[in-house]
Image: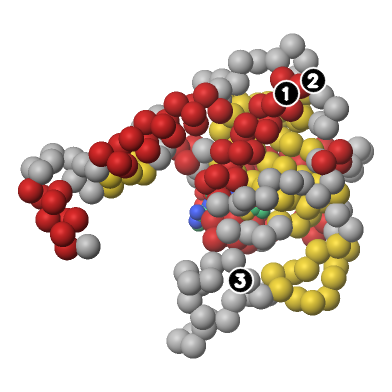
């Protein structure tokens, strides 16, 4: 570890430490050639992946001052399904999920938040479910296991509760976070998932939440 730091100092680089790219949002070490190469590779693939050219037939389910939400269904034209696949791949990469197989591919509903810059800056994948297990609040105190070490091992109740809609993925582009995009995506799902009714909070469930996902879900469910 020391030798690596030493090398960077010796190289006399101006860009020391972590940098965040202002267009793709990747965090990398500008002084490291490997990191820079990785960034360049990620940069173009990512920006290409989130590019939204506009579709002949698009199902706009919500409109906002800064963008709109488009719903993609399993039997939509292939250009729409391809975009969903590309975005899901980027999201899974970022989340470190490696099994991209949805449980029920022909019932999956994908909601894309399209920004005014014509980019997919948010994605939510929802599927019908019948039951869910409530996440129990974490034990706090000196003896509680570190949530960093096992960051997905939340304690769940073993009593199933009825639910309607499972959110298997929710993601917002790093540079667009904390602008209520995730909140608007979930509101829209509750409104559109089942025709003619607005789902109650406890009819939706987040599957396998990450720490970010859990912070968001906790906040969303309490307000
Ligand atoms: N830390 C603390 N509170 C948070 C965070 C956070 N990282 N993210 C959201 N919240 C809370 C805040 O209270 C926020 O309101 P505020 O900004 O007024 O304080 C409220 O939730 C609403 O947040 P949004 O702005 O709607 O959330 P955002 O658009 O930033 O998206 C998301 C949240 C999707 C979790 C985003 O951080 C993300 O994409 N993270 C990486 C991917 C990921 O981990 N996704 C969840 C995977 S789990 C699953 O897919 C089922
Ligand atoms: Zn970049």
The alpha-carbon separation of the residues under discs 3 and 1 comes to 35 Å
- Using the image as rendered, state which of residue 132 and residue 4 is in the foreground: 4
Q: Is the Cβ of the residue at disc 2 closer than 8 Å to that at disc 1?
A: yes
**Image height of 195 relative to 66, above or below:** below
Quarter where residue 163 is shown = bottom right
Mark 1: few/some/many CA within 10 Å (<14, 14-19, 20+): many
Q: Position of residue 220 (x, y in %)?
A: 65, 54
Q: Is the Cβ of the residue at disc 3 closer than 8 Å to that at disc 1?
A: no
| Residue with the mark numbered 1 | 80
Q: Position of residue 66 (x, y in %)?
A: 56, 26
Horizontal side, residue 39 vs residue 205: left or right: left
Horizontal side, residue 105 vs residue 170: left or right: right
Q: Residue at x 71, y 50 (%)?
A: 168
| Residue with the mark numbered 3 | 153
Q: Secondary structure at mark 3?
A: loop
| Residue with the mark numbered 2 | 77
Horizontal side, residue 15 vs residue 171: left or right: left
Residue farthest toward the right in the current orientation of the protein = 196
Q: Earlier in the sequence, mark 3 or mark 2?
A: 2
Residue 127 in view in this figure? yes
Q: Position of residue 162 (x, y in %)?
A: 88, 63
Q: Secondary structure at mark 1?
A: helix
The alpha-carbon separation of the residues under discs 3 and 2 comes to 38 Å
Q: Residue at x 12, y 56 (%)?
A: 6
Q: Earlier in the sequence, mark 3 or mark 1?
A: 1
């Amino acid at each position: 570890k020391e030798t690596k730091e030493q090398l960077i100092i010796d190289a006399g680089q101006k860009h020391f430490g972590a940098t965040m790219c202002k267009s793709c949002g990747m965090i990398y070490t500008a002084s490291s050639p490997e990191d820079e190469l990785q960034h360049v590779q990620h940069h173009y693939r990512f920006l290409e992946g989130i590019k939204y050219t506009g579709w002949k037939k698009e199902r706009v389910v919500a409109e906002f001052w800064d963008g709109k939400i488009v719903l993609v269904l399993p039997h939509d034209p292939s250009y729409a399904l391809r975009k969903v696949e590309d975005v899901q791949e980027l999201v899974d990469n970022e989340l470190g999920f490696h099994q991209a197989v949805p449980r029920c591919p022909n019932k999956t509903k994908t909601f894309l938040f399209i920004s005014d810059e014509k980019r997919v800056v948010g994605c939510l994948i929802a599927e019908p479910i019948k039951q869910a297990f409530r996440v129990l609040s974490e034990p706090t105190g000196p003896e509680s296991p570190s949530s960093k070490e096992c960051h997905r091992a939340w304690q769940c109740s073993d009593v199933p509760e009825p639910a309607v809609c499972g959110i298997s993925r929710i993601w917002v582009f790093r540079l667009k976070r904390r602008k209520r995009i995730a909140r608007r995506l979930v509101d829209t799902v509750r409104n559109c998932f089942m025709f003619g009714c607005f789902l109650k909070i406890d009819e939706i469930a987040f599957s396998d939440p990450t720490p970010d996902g859990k912070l968001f879900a906790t906040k969303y469910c309490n307000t």
